[in-house]
Image: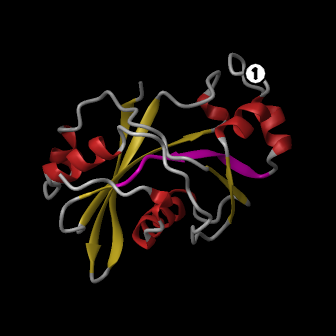
Amino acid sequence: APAAVAPGAGDAEVYEILSKLTAAEYGSDFELILINDRTEKWCVNSPLGVLFKQWPGLKQETIDSLIVGNSGEPALLEKRFSIPAAYALISEGEFVASLQDTANPNWDNFDSTFTDAQGFLTFSRIGFDAARSQALVIFSNAYRCSGTTISPADRKIAFFNRAGGSWKLVGIARGFQAR
């Protein structure tokens, strides 16, 4: 299976995909989008075979690339997103510090630390098929509605196809349990 590309590897396609996903999910509804400055390691323990039902054209090699590529160390992201809102790359440590207490997060303090932020968005590395015509990425957003945890229990998976030279978001599958 082809290796997943590390977002920090300087790959323009990676930032095109992550930017389109961020814009599709959050648009310009928020004045600040906070993005984890590192990718999240493989964190889904739900079976991924259900994705074939949702997206019949999805290749096994794309899923394999997603799994293998996210089994190593997290990758550092660069400030190369192109989205219709202001954004900042922050560390998980800065996010946790703004909540003050991981057992009982203080979301009011988060809101005053990061005014007008939509939450804390985290991406996996992206898995591609060998032809680089499709891509999968796991993502989550921690925010006040996450409740008493600092990160949500579920993850989402976005599926992209390349059409006419640019990447297009095909859809988002929700409800994948995180470890």
* Image position of 127 (left or right of 25): left
Reply yes or no: does residue 119 show up in magenta: yes
Quarter occupied by residue 145: top right
Disc 1 residue type (three-letter): Asp
Residue 144: x and y in percent read 67, 34
**As displayed, is residue 132 above or below residue 71?**
below
Reply yes or no: does residue 153 show up in magenta: no
Look at the image and give the residue range highlighted in magenta.
Answer: 116-126
**As displayed, is residue 41 above or below residue 9?**
above
Instruction: Name the residue located 34 percent from the left edge and 70 percent from the top edge.
Output: 168
The majority secondary structure of the magenta stretch comes to strand
Instruction: Name the residue located 22 percent from the left edge and 53 percent from the top edge.
Output: 62
Residue 157: x and y in percent read 36, 46
Q: Label 1: how many residues lie within 10 Å, few (<14), some (14-19) or many (20+)?
A: few
Quarter occupied by residue 163: bottom left
Residue 146: x and y in percent read 60, 30
Nearer to us in this view, 37 or 19: 37
Residue 77 showing in the rendered view:
yes
Total numbered circles: 1
Q: Which element type, helix, strand or loop, lies under badge 1?
A: loop
Quarter occupied by residue 12: bottom left
* Image position of 129 (left or right of 93): left
Label 1 sits on residue: 101
Q: Quadrant of the C terminus?
A: top left
**As displayed, is residue 11 above or below residue 89?**
below
Farthest residue to the bottom: give it.
164
Instruction: Name the residue located 23 percent from the left edge and 69 percent from the top edge.
Output: 133
